[in-house]
Image (tube, rainbow, N blue to C red):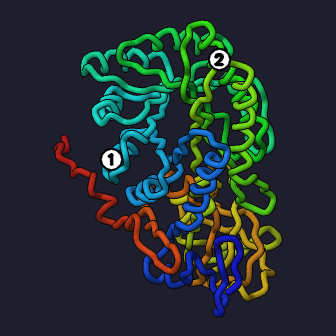
Amino acid sequence: MVTVSTHAVNEKGHLVLGGIDSLELAKTYGTPLFVYDLSLIRERARAFIQTFQEQNVPAQVAYASKAFSSVAMYQVMKQENLSLDVVSSGELYTAIKAGFPVERIHFHGNNKSKEELLLAIEHNIGCIVVDNFYEIELLKQLTAELNQKVNILLRVTPGVEAHTHDYITTGQQDSKFGFDLMNGQADLAFGQVYQDDYIQLLGLHCHIGSQIFETIGFKVAAEKLIKKMIEWHQDYDFECTVLNLGGGFGIRYTKEDAPLEPSVYVKEMIMVVKGLIAETDFAMPEIWIEPGRSLVGDAGTSLYTIGSQKEVPDVRNYLAVDGGMSDNIRPALYGALYDAVIANKLDEKADETYTIAGKCCESGDKLIEHITLPKAEPGDILAMFCTGAYGYAMASNYNRLTRPAVVFVENGKHQLAVRRETLEDIVHLDLPLTMEKE
């Protein structure tokens, strides 16, 4: 068996995921199907934690669960001693149902409702990441009424924006998230919470972008936040104990992508923080990070069954699968790129060029614009890699398609984590017409 990354090829020329023939998974659970290899998720989680331990720095590694959330996935993160970043009452409720330790749950969001904040306060979650002045007032009102304290971070926009290979130092000022660090909003927010009877300010949070391949943006952001924390310490004798530098660490979708190892991002952050702290009497804060895509993205593989083909002479050859933008909106939404193989023909020569089309009633429903594969036939299984982040999480019932099942695999074992929707599920919220025709 020849292993390539987390995948392998067996003697039949079939793709193997987590020690299991992908055709067996497709036959057992049907397609479209999301398959998560838990071994890679555990490896990534442990690498983040180990780096902090080796650097002797207190830390929390919080899974940014908007990438993919389910009861079983939250339980995996609990097994790996991670914390959890949630952004809605739905994600919070799922975490509670999963038995996730509430003291390790962090609640994000730029427009948290009163009901969502009440749910967080009543379950005594570990931290609320406060995003705006409206939220400060809501928290003051609710905590006073309930006579209950809450821990918070202030989310700030540090004027650093990073994406893939680039970063700029002003772009993030225009953001729907957080208090601006450069125009005085962060200082005003600090003044409203740091002596409150019920709101316990732990520190600062920022998030500078997604799919980042360089460390410089994180370093510049860390420097700006630490300087602000030191300033508050000097001016108000207030000590921030937590520095949350967010996530956005990149993964390899195609051969053109060149992400760094998790340890590299973490070491660079720690180096900047330690260097600045060494020059002051400010205590080393606990560093929090929020990997999401980098934990689950390339652990996920989508399996599809190939159906119809359409050749447009001198233009392209469409190869249609039984999923599409309903289970992976990213290619249609912003041109995301993916790689794929025919899972039952890995030992055959790839000499046909295809456009992988979905089955939604949209011309733009294309999963991959151009890919070279072996000659495809109806019934073949297409495996599209690195779909573990923002695939199922952003899936919809567009065209009233049912959402796929989700399966976990690990060391030759497999289990259903999310069942496939049925046609009955599609209509179970619908109500019949009761108004009579006039």
Q: What residue is pinned by disc 1? A: 96
Q: Label 1 vs label 2: CA separation?
A: 36 Å
Percent position of residue 281, x then y: 66, 18
Residue situated furthest bottom in the rendering? 11
The numbered mark, 1 or 2, whose residue comes first in the sequence reads 1
Q: Amino acid at mark 2?
A: Ile
User: Residue sitting at 63 percent across and 68 percent down?
Assistant: 384
Q: Which residue is mark 2?
A: 230
Query: In the rendered view, does 144 fall on the left or right side of 88?
Result: left
Q: Mark 1 or mark 2: which is in front?
A: 2
Label 2 secondary element: helix
Q: Decide if residue 10 is in sight here.
A: yes
Crowd band around label 1 with a 10 angstrom C-alpha radius: few (<14), some (14–19), many (20+): some
The quadrant where residue 312 appears: bottom right
Q: Residue at x 31, y 51 (%)?
A: 97
Q: Image quadrant of residue 437?
A: top left
Q: Position of residue 336 (x, y in %)?
A: 68, 53
User: Does residue 149 appear to the left or right of 60 in the view shown?
Assistant: left
Mark 1: amino acid? Ile
The residue positioned 63% from the left and 81% from the top of the image is 15
Q: Mark 1 near mark 2, Cβ–Cβ under 8 Å? A: no
In the foreground, 242 or 420:
242
Q: Residues within 10 Å of mark 2 (few under 14, many from 20)?
A: many
> Dividing the image into 4 quarters, which one contains the C terminus?
top left
Task: Report the side of 248 relative to 190 (left or right).
Answer: right
Q: Work out which quarter of the rendered image holds the N terminus and state it.
A: bottom right
